[in-house]
Amino acid sequence: MSVWDDLVGQEPVIAQLSSAAERTGGLAHAWLFTGPPGSGRVAAARAFAAALQCTETPRGCGHCASCHQVLQGTHADVEVVRPQGLSFGIRDARALVLRASSSPSGSGRQIVLFEDADRATEGAANALLKAIEEPPPRTVWLLCTPSPEDLLVTIRSRCRLVTLQTPPIAAIADFLVQRDGVERETAEVVARAAQGHISRARRLASDPRMRRVREQVVAVPRRLTGVSAAVAAAETLVNAAKAERDAQTAELNDAETSALRKALGESEKGRMPRGTAGALKELEDRQKSRATRILRDALDRTLLDLASYYRDVLTLQLGAGSELVNIELGPELRSAAGDGRPEDTLRRLDAIMDCRERLAANVNPQLAFEALTLALRNG
Protein backbone atom coordinates (compact mmCIF):
# COMPACT_ATOMS: atom_id res chain seq x y z
CA MET A 1 0.00 0.00 0.00
CA SER A 2 1.23 3.52 -0.85
CA VAL A 3 -0.15 7.03 -0.46
CA TRP A 4 -1.11 6.98 -4.16
CA ASP A 5 -3.60 4.11 -3.85
CA ASP A 6 -6.66 6.36 -3.50
CA LEU A 7 -5.99 8.11 -6.83
CA VAL A 8 -8.27 6.36 -9.31
CA GLY A 9 -7.41 6.47 -13.00
CA GLN A 10 -4.75 9.15 -12.52
CA GLU A 11 -1.56 7.35 -13.56
CA PRO A 12 0.07 10.41 -15.28
CA VAL A 13 -0.54 12.51 -12.15
CA ILE A 14 0.94 9.82 -9.91
CA ALA A 15 4.03 9.67 -12.12
CA GLN A 16 4.40 13.48 -12.03
CA LEU A 17 4.02 13.79 -8.25
CA SER A 18 6.06 10.76 -7.24
CA SER A 19 8.92 11.97 -9.43
CA ALA A 20 8.78 15.44 -7.85
CA ALA A 21 8.71 13.98 -4.33
CA GLU A 22 11.90 12.03 -4.97
CA ARG A 23 13.92 15.13 -5.90
CA THR A 24 16.43 16.29 -3.35
CA GLY A 25 16.26 19.91 -4.51
CA GLY A 26 14.53 22.28 -6.87
CA LEU A 27 11.00 21.50 -5.68
CA ALA A 28 8.42 24.08 -6.75
CA HIS A 29 7.13 26.07 -3.78
CA ALA A 30 3.51 26.25 -4.99
CA TRP A 31 1.33 23.64 -6.71
CA LEU A 32 -2.15 23.98 -8.17
CA PHE A 33 -4.29 20.82 -8.28
CA THR A 34 -7.22 21.08 -10.67
CA GLY A 35 -9.84 18.67 -11.96
CA PRO A 36 -13.59 18.07 -12.17
CA PRO A 37 -15.56 17.59 -8.93
CA GLY A 38 -14.87 14.14 -7.51
CA SER A 39 -11.78 13.51 -9.63
CA GLY A 40 -9.62 13.37 -6.51
CA ARG A 41 -7.70 16.65 -6.59
CA VAL A 42 -7.71 16.95 -2.78
CA ALA A 43 -6.71 13.29 -2.43
CA ALA A 44 -3.84 13.92 -4.86
CA ALA A 45 -2.68 16.97 -2.89
CA ARG A 46 -2.89 15.02 0.38
CA ALA A 47 -0.93 12.11 -1.09
CA PHE A 48 1.72 14.51 -2.38
CA ALA A 49 1.99 16.14 1.06
CA ALA A 50 2.46 12.69 2.59
CA ALA A 51 5.14 11.80 0.04
CA LEU A 52 7.00 15.05 0.75
CA GLN A 53 6.98 14.31 4.50
CA CYS A 54 7.68 10.58 4.10
CA THR A 55 10.79 9.26 5.86
CA GLU A 56 11.17 6.12 3.75
CA THR A 57 12.41 5.30 0.25
CA PRO A 58 10.66 5.48 -2.13
CA ARG A 59 8.74 8.45 -0.76
CA GLY A 60 5.06 7.95 -0.21
CA CYS A 61 5.38 4.48 1.32
CA GLY A 62 2.04 4.76 3.10
CA HIS A 63 3.15 2.89 6.23
CA CYS A 64 5.63 5.15 8.04
CA ALA A 65 4.50 7.43 10.88
CA SER A 66 4.73 10.58 8.76
CA CYS A 67 2.58 9.16 5.98
CA HIS A 68 -0.06 8.03 8.47
CA GLN A 69 -0.11 11.41 10.21
CA VAL A 70 -0.54 13.35 6.97
CA LEU A 71 -3.28 11.06 5.69
CA GLN A 72 -5.08 11.28 9.05
CA GLY A 73 -4.70 15.07 9.20
CA THR A 74 -2.56 15.11 12.35
CA HIS A 75 0.91 15.94 11.02
CA ALA A 76 2.31 19.00 12.82
CA ASP A 77 3.90 20.41 9.66
CA VAL A 78 0.93 20.02 7.33
CA GLU A 79 -1.69 22.76 7.65
CA VAL A 80 -4.98 21.68 6.06
CA VAL A 81 -7.40 24.50 5.22
CA ARG A 82 -11.06 23.59 4.59
CA PRO A 83 -13.31 26.62 4.09
CA GLN A 84 -16.49 25.85 6.01
CA GLY A 85 -18.69 28.56 4.56
CA LEU A 86 -19.43 30.03 1.17
CA SER A 87 -16.20 32.01 1.10
CA PHE A 88 -12.76 32.35 2.67
CA GLY A 89 -12.24 35.93 3.81
CA ILE A 90 -9.27 38.25 4.13
CA ARG A 91 -9.03 37.86 7.92
CA ASP A 92 -8.77 34.08 7.53
CA ALA A 93 -6.19 34.52 4.77
CA ARG A 94 -3.97 36.77 6.86
CA ALA A 95 -4.06 34.31 9.75
CA LEU A 96 -3.17 31.50 7.35
CA VAL A 97 -0.22 33.44 5.92
CA LEU A 98 1.08 33.98 9.44
CA ARG A 99 0.84 30.27 10.25
CA ALA A 100 2.45 29.30 6.95
CA SER A 101 5.49 31.43 7.75
CA SER A 102 6.37 29.37 10.84
CA SER A 103 9.30 27.02 10.75
CA PRO A 104 8.70 23.25 10.52
CA SER A 105 8.59 21.63 13.93
CA GLY A 106 9.81 18.15 13.11
CA SER A 107 10.38 17.81 9.38
CA GLY A 108 12.12 19.62 6.57
CA ARG A 109 9.01 21.34 5.18
CA GLN A 110 5.97 23.31 6.28
CA ILE A 111 3.12 22.38 3.91
CA VAL A 112 -0.14 24.29 3.47
CA LEU A 113 -2.89 22.26 1.78
CA PHE A 114 -5.72 24.61 0.82
CA GLU A 115 -8.87 22.75 -0.22
CA ASP A 116 -11.43 24.70 -2.28
CA ALA A 117 -9.04 27.60 -2.77
CA ASP A 118 -11.53 29.00 -5.27
CA ARG A 119 -13.69 30.04 -2.29
CA ALA A 120 -11.14 32.73 -1.41
CA THR A 121 -12.53 36.24 -1.85
CA GLU A 122 -10.62 38.74 -3.96
CA GLY A 123 -9.18 40.35 -0.86
CA ALA A 124 -8.16 36.97 0.56
CA ALA A 125 -6.55 35.96 -2.74
CA ASN A 126 -4.51 39.16 -2.78
CA ALA A 127 -3.40 38.50 0.80
CA LEU A 128 -2.27 35.00 -0.21
CA LEU A 129 -0.50 36.24 -3.32
CA LYS A 130 2.49 37.81 -1.58
CA ALA A 131 3.01 34.71 0.58
CA ILE A 132 2.99 32.53 -2.55
CA GLU A 133 5.24 34.96 -4.43
CA GLU A 134 7.83 35.08 -1.65
CA PRO A 135 7.30 32.06 0.61
CA PRO A 136 9.72 31.07 3.36
CA PRO A 137 12.35 28.72 1.92
CA ARG A 138 10.83 25.58 3.49
CA THR A 139 7.12 26.32 2.92
CA VAL A 140 5.19 24.53 0.15
CA TRP A 141 1.67 25.60 -0.91
CA LEU A 142 -0.79 23.06 -2.35
CA LEU A 143 -3.90 24.74 -3.73
CA CYS A 144 -6.98 22.84 -4.98
CA THR A 145 -9.57 24.27 -7.40
CA PRO A 146 -11.83 22.83 -10.10
CA SER A 147 -10.15 24.93 -12.81
CA PRO A 148 -7.02 27.13 -13.06
CA GLU A 149 -9.29 30.04 -14.02
CA ASP A 150 -10.83 29.90 -10.53
CA LEU A 151 -7.74 31.65 -9.12
CA LEU A 152 -6.14 35.00 -9.81
CA VAL A 153 -3.86 34.77 -12.83
CA THR A 154 -1.03 36.16 -10.68
CA ILE A 155 -1.39 33.21 -8.29
CA ARG A 156 -1.75 30.44 -10.85
CA SER A 157 1.22 31.76 -12.84
CA ARG A 158 3.40 31.02 -9.82
CA CYS A 159 2.15 27.47 -9.35
CA ARG A 160 3.15 24.16 -10.89
CA LEU A 161 -0.04 22.81 -12.46
CA VAL A 162 -1.36 19.29 -11.73
CA THR A 163 -4.38 18.39 -13.86
CA LEU A 164 -6.61 15.47 -12.94
CA GLN A 165 -9.11 13.90 -15.35
CA THR A 166 -12.53 12.38 -14.75
CA PRO A 167 -11.79 8.75 -13.77
CA PRO A 168 -13.18 6.01 -16.05
CA ILE A 169 -16.29 4.26 -14.75
CA ALA A 170 -14.54 0.88 -14.87
CA ALA A 171 -11.67 2.20 -12.73
CA ILE A 172 -14.09 3.55 -10.11
CA ALA A 173 -15.98 0.26 -10.00
CA ASP A 174 -12.72 -1.70 -9.58
CA PHE A 175 -11.70 0.66 -6.78
CA LEU A 176 -14.98 0.13 -4.92
CA VAL A 177 -14.69 -3.64 -5.23
CA GLN A 178 -11.03 -3.87 -4.22
CA ARG A 179 -10.82 -1.17 -1.53
CA ASP A 180 -14.33 -1.10 -0.04
CA GLY A 181 -15.51 -4.66 -0.68
CA VAL A 182 -18.57 -3.53 -2.64
CA GLU A 183 -20.34 -6.17 -4.72
CA ARG A 184 -19.44 -5.90 -8.39
CA GLU A 185 -23.00 -5.25 -9.60
CA THR A 186 -23.58 -2.48 -7.06
CA ALA A 187 -20.15 -0.99 -7.76
CA GLU A 188 -20.87 -0.71 -11.47
CA VAL A 189 -24.29 0.87 -10.90
CA VAL A 190 -23.06 3.53 -8.46
CA ALA A 191 -19.92 4.22 -10.51
CA ARG A 192 -22.12 5.15 -13.47
CA ALA A 193 -24.54 7.09 -11.28
CA ALA A 194 -21.72 9.13 -9.72
CA GLN A 195 -20.54 10.22 -13.19
CA GLY A 196 -16.85 10.15 -12.31
CA HIS A 197 -17.23 11.54 -8.76
CA ILE A 198 -15.27 9.08 -6.62
CA SER A 199 -16.38 10.20 -3.16
CA ARG A 200 -20.02 10.27 -4.24
CA ALA A 201 -19.68 6.77 -5.66
CA ARG A 202 -18.38 5.62 -2.28
CA ARG A 203 -21.27 7.29 -0.45
CA LEU A 204 -23.82 5.80 -2.83
CA ALA A 205 -22.27 2.37 -2.34
CA SER A 206 -22.26 2.59 1.45
CA ASP A 207 -25.49 4.51 2.13
CA PRO A 208 -28.77 2.97 0.93
CA ARG A 209 -30.58 6.19 1.89
CA MET A 210 -28.53 8.16 -0.64
CA ARG A 211 -29.32 5.61 -3.32
CA ARG A 212 -33.03 5.96 -2.56
CA VAL A 213 -32.80 9.75 -2.77
CA ARG A 214 -31.14 9.52 -6.16
CA GLU A 215 -33.79 7.06 -7.35
CA GLN A 216 -36.42 9.62 -6.37
CA VAL A 217 -34.63 12.32 -8.34
CA VAL A 218 -34.38 10.35 -11.59
CA ALA A 219 -38.03 9.32 -11.15
CA VAL A 220 -39.13 12.96 -11.33
CA PRO A 221 -39.28 13.31 -15.16
CA ARG A 222 -42.03 10.71 -15.51
CA ARG A 223 -44.09 12.46 -12.79
CA LEU A 224 -44.16 15.85 -14.53
CA THR A 225 -47.61 15.47 -16.08
CA GLY A 226 -49.05 18.87 -15.14
CA VAL A 227 -48.59 22.10 -13.22
CA SER A 228 -49.57 20.73 -9.80
CA ALA A 229 -47.36 17.68 -10.27
CA ALA A 230 -44.43 19.92 -11.26
CA VAL A 231 -44.83 22.13 -8.18
CA ALA A 232 -45.06 19.06 -5.92
CA ALA A 233 -41.95 17.58 -7.52
CA ALA A 234 -40.01 20.80 -6.89
CA GLU A 235 -40.97 20.72 -3.22
CA THR A 236 -39.91 17.07 -2.95
CA LEU A 237 -36.49 17.78 -4.49
CA VAL A 238 -35.78 20.81 -2.29
CA ASN A 239 -36.93 19.03 0.87
CA ALA A 240 -34.66 16.07 0.09
CA ALA A 241 -31.69 18.43 -0.22
CA LYS A 242 -32.62 20.14 3.05
CA ALA A 243 -32.85 16.77 4.80
CA GLU A 244 -29.35 15.92 3.57
CA ARG A 245 -28.09 19.27 4.85
CA ASP A 246 -29.67 18.73 8.27
CA ALA A 247 -28.24 15.23 8.52
CA GLN A 248 -24.73 16.49 7.80
CA THR A 249 -24.81 19.54 10.06
CA ALA A 250 -26.83 18.56 13.13
CA GLU A 251 -24.32 16.30 14.86
CA LEU A 252 -21.34 18.42 13.80
CA ASN A 253 -22.93 21.66 15.03
CA ASP A 254 -23.80 20.15 18.42
CA ALA A 255 -20.26 18.85 18.91
CA GLU A 256 -18.67 22.18 17.94
CA THR A 257 -20.99 24.23 20.15
CA SER A 258 -20.50 21.93 23.12
CA ALA A 259 -16.71 22.01 22.74
CA LEU A 260 -16.62 25.80 22.49
CA ARG A 261 -18.93 26.33 25.48
CA LYS A 262 -16.73 24.03 27.54
CA ALA A 263 -13.56 25.82 26.41
CA LEU A 264 -15.10 29.20 27.31
CA GLY A 265 -15.87 28.05 30.85
CA GLU A 266 -19.48 26.91 30.89
CA SER A 267 -20.72 26.23 34.42
CA GLU A 268 -22.35 23.02 35.56
CA LYS A 269 -25.72 24.80 35.32
CA GLY A 270 -25.10 25.77 31.70
CA ARG A 271 -24.28 29.43 32.40
CA MET A 272 -21.63 31.17 30.32
CA PRO A 273 -19.11 33.74 31.64
CA ARG A 274 -19.46 37.34 30.56
CA GLY A 275 -17.80 38.28 27.29
CA THR A 276 -18.31 34.92 25.60
CA ALA A 277 -21.43 35.78 23.60
CA GLY A 278 -19.36 37.12 20.70
CA ALA A 279 -17.40 33.90 20.26
CA LEU A 280 -20.60 31.82 20.34
CA LYS A 281 -22.26 34.15 17.79
CA GLU A 282 -19.22 33.88 15.50
CA LEU A 283 -19.43 30.08 15.64
CA GLU A 284 -23.16 30.21 14.91
CA ASP A 285 -22.55 32.42 11.87
CA ARG A 286 -19.90 30.00 10.55
CA GLN A 287 -22.28 27.08 11.04
CA LYS A 288 -25.06 28.88 9.14
CA SER A 289 -22.69 29.66 6.28
CA ARG A 290 -21.57 26.04 6.16
CA ALA A 291 -25.19 24.83 6.14
CA THR A 292 -25.93 27.12 3.19
CA ARG A 293 -22.96 25.71 1.28
CA ILE A 294 -23.97 22.11 2.02
CA LEU A 295 -27.52 22.83 0.83
CA ARG A 296 -26.23 24.36 -2.38
CA ASP A 297 -24.01 21.36 -2.99
CA ALA A 298 -26.93 18.98 -2.39
CA LEU A 299 -29.18 20.94 -4.76
CA ASP A 300 -26.46 20.95 -7.40
CA ARG A 301 -26.07 17.18 -7.14
CA THR A 302 -29.82 16.89 -7.64
CA LEU A 303 -29.59 18.96 -10.82
CA LEU A 304 -26.72 16.85 -12.14
CA ASP A 305 -28.71 13.68 -11.50
CA LEU A 306 -31.65 15.16 -13.42
CA ALA A 307 -29.30 16.17 -16.22
CA SER A 308 -28.00 12.59 -16.41
CA TYR A 309 -31.55 11.40 -17.17
CA TYR A 310 -32.01 13.78 -20.07
CA ARG A 311 -28.46 13.17 -21.25
CA ASP A 312 -29.36 9.48 -21.57
CA VAL A 313 -32.56 10.35 -23.47
CA LEU A 314 -30.58 12.55 -25.87
CA THR A 315 -27.98 9.82 -26.35
CA LEU A 316 -30.72 7.43 -27.46
CA GLN A 317 -32.41 10.02 -29.67
CA LEU A 318 -29.18 10.79 -31.50
CA GLY A 319 -28.02 7.18 -31.64
CA ALA A 320 -24.67 8.25 -30.18
CA GLY A 321 -23.87 4.76 -28.88
CA SER A 322 -22.48 6.08 -25.58
CA GLU A 323 -23.08 4.02 -22.45
CA LEU A 324 -26.08 5.15 -20.45
CA VAL A 325 -25.62 6.58 -16.97
CA ASN A 326 -28.98 5.28 -15.74
CA ILE A 327 -28.78 1.93 -17.48
CA GLU A 328 -31.27 0.38 -15.04
CA LEU A 329 -33.93 2.73 -16.50
CA GLY A 330 -33.32 1.49 -20.03
CA PRO A 331 -36.95 0.75 -21.06
CA GLU A 332 -38.22 4.06 -19.63
CA LEU A 333 -35.43 6.03 -21.30
CA ARG A 334 -36.07 4.41 -24.66
CA SER A 335 -39.77 5.21 -24.34
CA ALA A 336 -39.00 8.85 -23.47
CA ALA A 337 -36.58 9.07 -26.38
CA GLY A 338 -39.21 7.75 -28.80
CA ASP A 339 -41.91 10.10 -27.52
CA GLY A 340 -39.88 13.30 -27.85
CA ARG A 341 -37.54 15.22 -30.08
CA PRO A 342 -33.83 15.95 -29.55
CA GLU A 343 -34.52 19.69 -29.54
CA ASP A 344 -37.00 19.26 -26.67
CA THR A 345 -34.44 17.29 -24.69
CA LEU A 346 -31.81 19.97 -25.30
CA ARG A 347 -34.28 22.60 -24.10
CA ARG A 348 -34.76 20.65 -20.86
CA LEU A 349 -31.00 20.32 -20.36
CA ASP A 350 -30.68 24.09 -20.88
CA ALA A 351 -33.38 24.61 -18.24
CA ILE A 352 -31.36 22.56 -15.76
CA MET A 353 -28.23 24.63 -16.45
CA ASP A 354 -30.28 27.83 -16.06
CA CYS A 355 -31.44 26.59 -12.66
CA ARG A 356 -27.82 26.06 -11.60
CA GLU A 357 -27.06 29.65 -12.56
CA ARG A 358 -30.06 30.94 -10.61
CA LEU A 359 -28.97 29.09 -7.49
CA ALA A 360 -25.46 30.50 -7.87
CA ALA A 361 -27.07 33.95 -8.00
CA ASN A 362 -28.85 33.28 -4.66
CA VAL A 363 -32.35 32.81 -6.08
CA ASN A 364 -34.68 31.12 -3.57
CA PRO A 365 -34.25 27.35 -4.14
CA GLN A 366 -37.98 26.62 -4.02
CA LEU A 367 -38.72 29.23 -6.70
CA ALA A 368 -35.78 28.12 -8.83
CA PHE A 369 -36.87 24.48 -8.73
CA GLU A 370 -40.50 25.30 -9.42
CA ALA A 371 -39.44 27.20 -12.55
CA LEU A 372 -37.32 24.22 -13.52
CA THR A 373 -39.91 21.50 -13.06
CA LEU A 374 -42.49 23.58 -14.95
CA ALA A 375 -40.01 23.87 -17.82
CA LEU A 376 -39.41 20.11 -17.72
CA ARG A 377 -43.09 19.20 -17.93
CA ASN A 378 -44.10 16.55 -20.41
CA GLY A 379 -46.39 17.58 -23.24
Image (cartoon, rainbow, N blue to C red):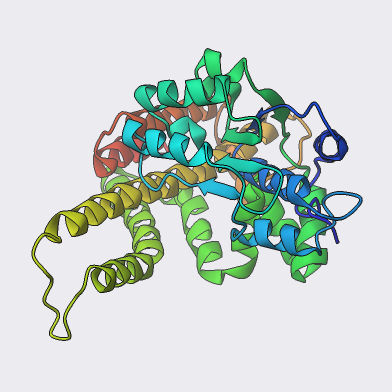
120 up-or-down from 109: above or below: above
Whether residue 305 sits left or right of residue 293 in the image: it is right
242 or 259, which lies in front?
259
Point out residue 8 in the picture as x, y percentages from the top left corner. Answer: 78, 48
Could you say which quadrant of the image residue 55 lies in?
A: bottom right
Report the number of discs: 0
Looking at the image, which residue is at 62% across and 57% down?
A: 75
Image quadrant where one finds the C terminus? top left
Q: Residue at x 26, y 34 (%)?
A: 363
Please state which of residues 183 and 151 is positioned toward the viewer in this rendering.
151
Residue depicted at x 38% and y 22%: 122
Q: Residue furthest left?
A: 274
Q: Up-down: is 170 above or below 31?
A: below
The residue located at (52%, 51%) in the rendering is 218
Q: Position of residue 87 (x, y in %)?
A: 36, 36
Residue reaching furthest to the bottom = 268
Question: Is 281 placed above or below 121 here?
Answer: below
The N terminus lies in quadrant: bottom right
Q: Nearer the viewer, residue 102 or 329?
A: 102
Any part of residue 38 in sight: yes
Whether residue 326 is visible: no
Where is residue 162 drawn, in percent x and y?
72, 29
Q: Position of residue 342 (x, y in %)?
A: 58, 25
Judge left or right: residue 118 versus residue 242: right
Q: Residue furthest right?
A: 57
